[in-house]
Image (cartoon, grey):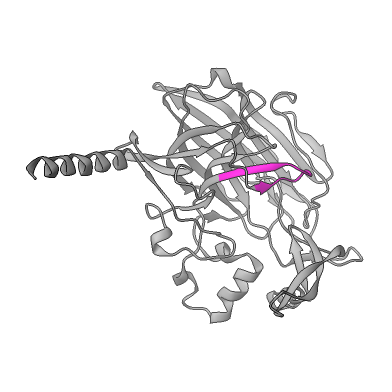
């Protein structure tokens, strides 16, 4: 009996020790459509999005950062669950979002406000963690990249997203309109939106005789604002670590116009332009030269570009300044560069980090992130 008890205690201790090494963070929140519950908020400032598998997002007690467990992100070969922009392309996601809303953000509003925001996918517009258009911001975060990271990975590990105005639409005649919430919801009652394209709702009956709605086979000519490339991204692709800035001065984004710069092909600070879109590689470094098995901290200063709302026009360009710090050295990798960076939306920008695997890549990838902070400078 005593021997069995000792074995039982050893087993329990082993489980405890193992669980402290890496602890899965299992909750996920759709920040556009849902408010976050208290038990879904991580460390009082994050919510998780994307793949729900235990290994996708974890506390890592083996790799601490400033006395706290870091966040470990991982995607395996089979973990691309999202469709890409190109036909047949897939993407994978396991990220943490600094921007989200909670139920108390709607306490002073009528009950319909939350329901309407959920339908319009603007719940996070009522929450925390985003800055205004034209803001001057300071950001900081750290990454720990393992020695065995693949040189052919294609992943964004930090990105700043725009917050598109979902009530901005164009009709079949091409007229662009910013609708009221009520006007948009009436439109939504008779249409189904797939990304930015609208289809008429078609009433059908399922096998149980219940009424269901499916979308028509052909688009009906209406378009809705959905956004586009992130205004700023840090990632690995084509054998490089890169920093990329995007700008879109168009009031209603044309999703058919794609403008993208290649870390391998395009020169630093030589913008690629197409229509109202601009894409710039602000910095790049061969992935083989990126510091491995150590914490690398980025300090980022951004003045977001300013746009003329309601018109396809940029009022003033932005500025980007980036320091990359490791081994006690401060490396000034982007030096106060004037740059087009942002989107012509009413709302501003918010931060996410983790793994956003793009370009149909299914190369397994993992790394750790920690130490995020942001500050409004003006």
Q: Is residue 86 left or right of residue 318?
A: right
Is 148 part of what is drawn in magenta? no
Picture quarter containing residue 184? bottom right
Q: Is residue 178 visible?
A: no
User: How far across and how far down the image is residue 301, in percent?
Assistant: 54, 39
Q: Is residue 96 visible?
A: yes
Picture quarter containing residue 126? bottom right
- The tally of labels here is 0
Depth check, front residue: 206 or 47:
206
Of all residues, the one furthest to the top in this rendering is 289
Q: Which residues are magenta?
A: 82-93
Q: Is residue 19 left or right of residue 343?
A: left
Give the residue displayed 59% in from the left and 35% down from the top. 77
Of all residues, the one furthest to the left in this rendering is 2
Q: Is residue 100 left or right of residue 258?
A: left
Of all residues, the one furthest to the right in this rendering is 173
Quadrant where the image shows the N terminus: top left
User: How far across and how far down the image is residue 259, in percent?
Assistant: 78, 40
Q: Is the residue 240 above or below the residue 352 in the image?
A: above
User: How far across and how far down the image is residue 160, in percent?
Assistant: 59, 46
Q: Is the residue 52 above or below the residue 321 in the image?
A: below
User: How far across and how far down the image is residue 5, in percent?
Assistant: 12, 45
Is 90 part of what is drawn in magenta? yes
């Amino acid at each position: 009996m005593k021997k069995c008890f000792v074995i039982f205690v050893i087993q329990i201790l082993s489980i405890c020790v193992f669980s402290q090494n890496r602890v899965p963070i299992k909750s996920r929140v759709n920040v556009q459509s849902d408010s976050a519950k208290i038990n879904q908020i991580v460390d009082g400032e994050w919510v998780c999005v994307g793949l729900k598998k235990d290994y996708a997002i974890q506390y890592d007690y083996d790799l601490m950062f400033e006395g706290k467990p870091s966040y470990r992100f991982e995607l395996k070969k089979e973990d691309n669950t999202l469709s890409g922009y190109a036909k047949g392309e897939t993407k994978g996601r396991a990220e943490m979002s600094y921007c989200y809303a909670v139920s108390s953000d709607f306490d002073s509003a009528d009950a319909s406000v939350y329901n309407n925001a959920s339908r319009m996918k603007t719940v996070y517009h009522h929450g925390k963690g985003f800055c205004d258009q034209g803001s001057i911001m300071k950001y900081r975060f750290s990454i720990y990249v393992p020695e065995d990271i693949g040189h052919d990975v294609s992943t964004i590990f930090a990105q700043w997203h725009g917050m598109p105005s979902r009530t901005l639409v164009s009709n079949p005649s091409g007229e662009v309109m910013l609708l009221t919430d009520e006007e948009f919801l009436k439109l939504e009652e008779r249409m189904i939106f797939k990304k930015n394209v609208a289809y008429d709702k078609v009433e059908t009956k399922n096998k149980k005789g219940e009424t269901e709605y499916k979308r028509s086979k052909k688009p009906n000519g209406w378009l809705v604002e959905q956004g586009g490339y992130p205004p700023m991204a840090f990632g690995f692709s084509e054998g490089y670590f890169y920093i990329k800035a995007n700008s879109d001065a168009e009031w209603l984004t044309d999703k058919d116009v794609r403008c993208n710069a290649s870390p391998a092909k395009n020169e630093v600070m030589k913008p690629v332009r197409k229509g109202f879109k601009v894409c710039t590689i602000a910095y790049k470094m061969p992935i083989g030269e990126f510091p491995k098995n150590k914490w690398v901290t980025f300090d980022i200063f951004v003045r977001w570009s300013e746009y003329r709302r309601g018109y396809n026009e940029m009022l003033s360009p932005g500025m980007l300044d980036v320091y990359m710090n490791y081994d006690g050295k401060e490396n000034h990798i982007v030096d106060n560069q004037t740059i087009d960076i942002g989107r012509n939306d009413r709302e501003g920008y918010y931060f996410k980090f983790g793994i956003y695997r793009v370009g149909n890549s299914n190369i397994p990838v993992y790394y750790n992130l920690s130490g995020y902070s942001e500050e409004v400078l003006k």
